[in-house]
Amino acid sequence: MLLNIGQEKMIFDKDIIGIFDLDNTTVSKATRDYINFSVKKDECVTVSMDDLPKSFIVCEKNGKRTVYISPFNTATVYRRIESKSY
């Protein structure tokens, strides 16, 4: 099923590897390095430039990994997946 992750950006829920809270995970240098690496490899997509980013979603489709920076918090994304109301 398709999942809206902000600003009408849709991804397939089956492609999601992980959903991470930016406030909690970016405390770790390893996470910051991973996001910076993704940006340098042009694998990072910022979904909304207007809203403060709250989570990042790691997806893989056909062997290509993409990191989406989303304005939705992790609870919202999980709730949408669980309820299939996206």
Image (spheres, helix red, strand yellow):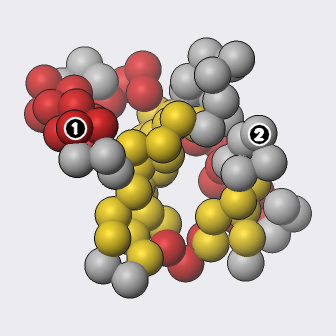
Per the image, the residue denoted by label 1 is 40
Mark 2 packing: few (<14 Cα in 10 Å), some, or many (20+)?
A: few
Q: What residue is rendered at 13% in x and 24% in y?
A: 29
78 to 28, vertically: above or below:
below
Q: What mark, if any, has residue 7 been given in the picture?
A: 2
The image shows residue 40 at horizontal and vertical percentages of 22, 38
Q: Is residue 78 visible?
A: yes
Which element carries disc 1, helix, strand or loop?
Answer: helix
84 to 79, vertically: above or below:
below
Q: What residue is rendered at 33% in x and 70% in y?
A: 64
> Taking 24 as reference, is 1 left or right?
right
Three-letter code, disc 1: Lys
> Taking 12 as reference, is 28 left or right?
left
Three-letter code, disc 2: Gln
**The C terminus is located in which quarter?**
bottom right
Q: What residue is rendered at 30% in x and 79% in y?
A: 63
The image shows residue 10 at horizontal and vertical percentages of 70, 59
- Front residue (pair 71, 37): 37
